[in-house]
Amino acid sequence: MLYVRILQMSEKQLIEGCLQGDRKAQEELYNTYSRRMMGLCMRYVSDRETARDLLQDGFIKLFTSLNLYAGKGPFEAWMRMIFVNVAIEHLRKKDILRDTSDLENIPEISMDETVVSSLTEEAIMDLVRQLPNGYRTIFNLFAVEGYSHREIGEKLNISEATSRSQYNRARQWLRDRLEKENL
């Protein structure tokens, strides 16, 4: 039997329902955003099981912090910030970010745009998932989430120069992988 949801709650109704502890609203919010947030979690950790744990932790944090959402700016952007912070906290607890090193003078890396444009989004994300943990975290924060190197430095307790160098190393690593796969 095909189940069709006739009435979907608006985002504002979902938030209000969740604030009131309505399980149906919580389930609807989860169903609406879980795939996107799982994709975000998978960008920060390389295995699905850990990503599922981050997804669960992120939704718990979201539901317990929902009263802090002021309605300024898009709800999904606010939600993404929570999930990014949950992922970063996980990486900190596991001491995965320890390997970032201060290298100030790493040159900018240029990438062949024709090679990148020929890849599917899934292929690109697979390559990003293969990045070493520190590189992957900084690459995601800068290239995907749009944080500045200063903001990344503050979030990860590293220098702005370290963030820049790790980002450039990530780009170099990706470029090397792309060259190997296209030979």
Image (cartoon, helix red, strand yellow):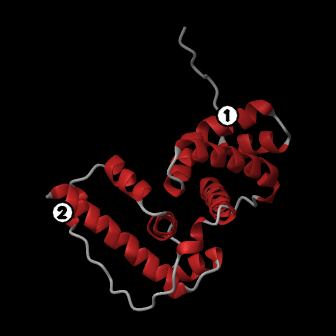
Q: Nearer the viewer, residue 162 or 86?
A: 162
Q: Specify which label sits upstream in the sequence, 2 or 1.
A: 1
Horizontal and vertical percent for residue 158? 60, 81
Q: Image height check: is 22 above or below 154?
A: above
Residue 54 in the figure: left or right of residue 128:
right
Q: Secondary structure at mark 2?
A: helix
Q: Secondary structure at mark 1?
A: helix
Q: Identify the mark at residue 90; answer none if there is no mark.
A: none
Q: Label 1 is placed on what type of residue?
A: Glu
- Which residue: 43% across, 54% down? 129
Mark 2: give few (<14), some (14-19) or many (20+) Cα within 10 Å. Answer: few
- Which residue: 81% across, 50% down? 64
Horizontal and vertical percent for residue 75? 65, 54
Q: Label 2 is placed on what type of residue?
A: Thr
- Which residue: 62% across, 58% down? 87
Residue 103 in the figure: left or right of residue 71:
left
Q: Nearer the viewer, residue 9 or 93?
A: 93
Residue 141 in the figure: left or right of residue 107:
right
Can you name the residue that lies furthest to the right here? 20
Can you name the residue that lies furthest to the top here? 1
Q: Residue under circle 2?
A: 114
Q: Residue under circle 1?
A: 28
